Image: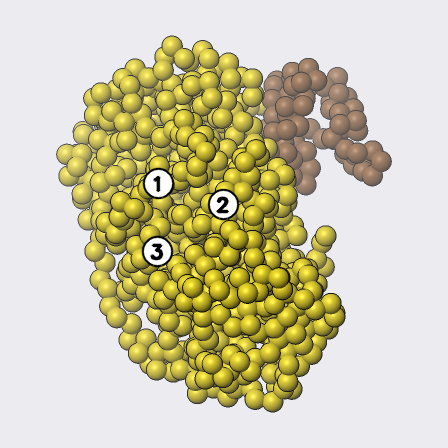
Amino acid sequence: MPKAELLDPQGKAVAGALSRLGKTRFTGVRIGKRFEVTVDGEVDAALLAEVRELAVDMFSNSVIEDVVSVDVLDAAVTA
Amino acid sequence: MTTATPSPVAADTVANAAATPDREQPYAALGLKPEEYASIREILGRRPTSGELAMYSVMWSEHCSYKSSKPYLRQFGSKTTEKMRRNLMVGMGENAGVVDVGNGWAVTFKIESHNHPSYIEPFQGAATGVGGIVRDIISMGARPVAVMDALRFGDIDDPDTARVVHGVVSGISFYGNCLGLPNIGGETYFDSVYQANPLVNALAVGVLRHEDLHLANARGVGNKVVLFGARTGGDGIGGASILASDSFSEGGPTKRPAVQVGDPFAEKVLIECCLELFQQELVEGIQDLGAAGISCATSELASNGDGGMFIELENVLLRDPTLTAEEILMSESQERMMAIVRPEKLDGFLAVVTKWDVETSVLGEVTDTGRLIINWHGEEIVNVEPRTVAVDGPVYNRPVSYPTWIDALNADSASALARPTTPEELREQVFRLLGSANLADKRWITNQYDTYVLGNTALSFPDDGGMVRVDEESGLGFAVATDANGRYCQLDPYHGAQLALAEAFRNVAVTGATPVAVSDCLNFGSPENPEVMWQFSRAVEGLADGCMAMEIPVTGGNVSFYNQTGDVPIHPTPVVAVLGTIDDVAKRIPSGWQDDGNNIYLLGVTREELDGSAWAGVIHDHLGGTPPTVDLAAELRLADLIAAANEENIISSAHDLADGGLAQAVVESVLRFGVGARIWLGEIIERDGIDAATALFSESTGRVIVSVPREDDVKFRGLCEGRDYPALRIGVTDSQDTLEIQDVFTATIDELRAAHRSPLPERFGATIG
């Protein structure tokens, strides 16, 4: 992942797109070798399903890419 | 995971600093010398707070304060005559110089170094170099219209060179192409002296109407200080990382990356946003945030204005909420601007930035207290006189000593080297030069850049200079060229700098433009090395004297010290950018031959000047002697002659002779449009009393080859005679696909092209486009 202090223009652009789509529970996205999506509050099953859907529809190009896994990390892992 | 809640780290306040005078401070780790730290304590009458220390340390760094170079750079001001100022609207000391180009138009341009970041992280280092120089142009109220880069890399065959070349070139093309700015030329050299210290000098040009000119200063008590653009993050704090790992910020992230990541799309929006703010007269001034970030912008704006400013630092929008006050002051996050806005215009200002989706926060206001006061959550953490930070930094008269090695170097002339005499040897050496790293075709690099975007590019690589149209109705335009020959400067920095100026001047003149202004980027080794300081002092003196002789002013630029590989300083590399104006870009002069049957003339005389030449370097791996003589008066006469010939429309091309001499210039003229020629050397050899090798490879200055249509031949000869400039007919263009140098060799255009184009793709991969 890009170092936490560095600007991540890609992640910023995707975060902007999420908010334009009305996905208000997400507070940030960072993109390195994987996507990290930050959420406000706890991750429940519904939200996880929503992220899975976004991973397939938006974060990846299904013509050439597969979504390998969608996991919940606690804040300590990403900090 | 949850968002970390920012818990403001208790900052070192002014009151705290006064109460704890003996607290130890990490000034040395911030790059301050003990005497500089003592001087800060004296200025403040107490110990600095950690925030003040952060500000002083970055603003008093060599990069921001010019503390070693200032005493010398004053010459650029003192050696300026009234006549030189005639077109100058803004001179040195502002973000960029501004030159009147007529019809109510002005052009602003500047060249700046981004050398060290480009070695550590070539892609982002070079990309942010472009971004930074473009923001300097925006802050003058101009629309950026072109960029250009002067690059120096290590030995082309060193494995690390490919890493740096790929990164730097991709970084430049990424940022410039995304921004939609044409890259109109520049130069690339390879030399092992730049192995661990490549030079990335980025130039940008902007255009503006006279009435749109804006200077960055903070005037008008009560006016708001507004920060807009990207959010502030913990990137680019650099050597200051000690702040984060030291006692100031327990609990914060420990290691800050020294490089920044740029976002050209954010910058593009910022360009349009700033231009609209200027156009609607919603701002008093805009300052870009570059090196030293908020520390620099606040202290410089206050110093240039009414002298006081009050800032509430917690209003800065952060990307990382754990940043400490000191880090916010020092962060070099990209794509940020600071504006001074009248209170009654704030709503209009906010409407424009909102339209462009640019994040904005009001940090504070202009005051008349003469103090720059910065609060952090209600506590005063900085209270300084801004001029002591931004203007009156330390100035060093560093020791200067005449290099012990230079007499021996100057005595080791290339005249003792074996010269080719037989046609076979001459042919072989012409091809070796043509295929050498520095004379080879650079399209592997330049093809990665957008050249024609915006639709106003009239000339670009591989022409001698880049040219861009400013006014679509009249065709008014400008031309720019950059040059520096580090090898010449190593032999003689005074004349080496003048040779760079003369070559850049000539490169602009041969495009048909009239040179009017200079910007320079002075790349040198460590100023703490007295021999480097000698090189620097001589180069600056040479350039200042040269500019006075040629009557074109230096409008700005930058100095980059500490460029060395290990303990070995780079060759002194004063990159000189010359800007010229042209009434109508339709009158530009092509650099290559296009029609057969044109007479080819060599203007100027050829002397036995092989010292420091590409020939000596490539064939004999030799550097010694004294560089070619430079006659600036002759350069002026040559430029006038070309302008007069172009005015009468009697020359069909003009190409400057420089590295590689006549042989290289002739081949480039052939390859430009694929038109062959027959050349004879006999008359040059006879008139100038030289041998064939000297005729082909000497790098005497004041020389240009021009092609003249048959019907204009008499007129052209008359013009040269009337102006008493030496001119010799040396050949004729023809419809054969060959270059024939009579009695020496004949080569097909395909052979020449293959030799010229192959060196870079052989090392770096296929050329695109």
Q: Earlier in the sequence, mark 2 or mark 1?
A: 1
Residue B141 seen in the figure: no
Question: Relative to B754, is B142 above or below?
Answer: above
Q: Position of residue B420 (x, y in %)?
A: 56, 86
Q: State which mark lies toward you, 3 or 2.
A: 2
Chain ID for label 2?
A: B
Residue located at (42% from left, 18% from top): B282
Who is closer to the viewer here, A18 or B305?
A: B305
Which chain can be seen in yellow?
Answer: B
Chain ID for label 3?
A: B
Question: Relative to B509, is A59 above or below?
Answer: above
- For label 3, the crowd category at 10 Å Cα-Cα, with few meaning under 14, some 14 to 19 and many 20 or more, is some
Label 1: which residue?
B88
Q: Position of residue B758 (x, y in %)?
A: 68, 67
Label 2: which residue?
B582
- Residue B550, label in figure: 3
Residue B499, quarter of picture = bottom left
